[in-house]
Image (cartoon, grey):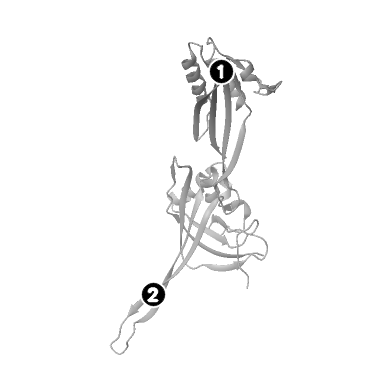
Amino acid sequence: MRDTLLTQITTNLAGSNVKVSSELPFNNGGEVLYMKNKKHFYLDAEQEAREEFIKCLDKNDVEQTTTTLNGYLTVDAKNQPGDISNVVASILSANSVITNTIDNSAGVTTEIENDAITYTFEFNFITII
Amino acid sequence: MAVINVSAGSEAVLELSPVGDIDTPANVLTVPQMQDITINNSTGVFRFKTLDNTAESAVTTPATNQLSLNVVVDEDSFFGNATLTANGAVIETGLFGVSTSKTKVTFRAYFNGTDSGSKYLEGAGFISGLSPTVNMDAPVWISPVTIEVDGDFAEGTEA
């Protein structure tokens, strides 16, 4: 799921001022990569939660799986890229590439630290198995 | 005294087959993913009053027997497998098929699994009451199923 989403985000951001990294947003020398490499989008690993959706007598229960992926993008707060609105919209709209879900949502929050603004994206995909 | 509970390997199981085929495993559909099952054996009663009695009298009339359950709709069990023509109508056409064709089926409802010694009620009847439903708050097809029993239940113990 991460690979599919990352590929779609890469396609959507082609020609924009933001590059997409396939690396995970790990710490490097005490600093997370997206803070260090501004104008680079990072997508974290999948987080998966399973819960019982329908309980059945034969124990063949129907389960609901919620897959969450977080993405990060940091840019200069004062001089944001001119196309930042399009970049954010393009990242959010990439969620439609994931199919066979019963619920598919994406959202973004921002946080300013010193001279940098970090966009934190959250993608949620709910499937039934 | 022993409580019959629902636990792994000791759960309620419903088997369906063409009439008289319930002991032929290849022709038997074990209904998967039942949410609940209710067995109704409702004896009919005719009540009457007489002038010389201060209370009503009652006589029994034939019972109404019925099984009702709710299932998660499974494609094979609901619509059948058209390639398995040799395995009888239940396997071939599924719950929906035998309901629409009004084909009588034999059922066996186990109370505590299908192991040797397990108790069951057996009979024959017609599938009815299918009403599959789905919505965005419950996005999995679920359907009630009723078996209108023709005649009596017969109690049995798995050999």
From the image, tell me which residue sits under label 2: B45
SS at mark 1 in the image: strand
Distance CA(mark 1)–CA(mark 2): 81 Å
**Residue B150 in the image: x percent, y percent?**
46, 63
Q: Nearer the viewer, residue A56 or B41?
A: A56
Residue drawn at 55 percent across, 25 percent down: A120
Amino acid marked by disc 1 = Ala
**Residue B61 in the image: x percent, y percent?**
40, 74
**Callout 1: residue from which chain?**
A
Question: Image quadrant for the C terminus of chain A?
Answer: top right
Residue at the farthest front position: A114
Q: Nearer the viewer, residue B57 or B30?
A: B57
Amino acid marked by disc 2 = Val
B98 to the left or right of B159: left
**Rendered position, B137 above or below B22:** above
Q: Quadrant of residue A6?
A: top right
Residue drawn at 60 percent across, 41 percent down: A50
How many numbered marks appear?
2
Residue at the farthest bottom position: B52
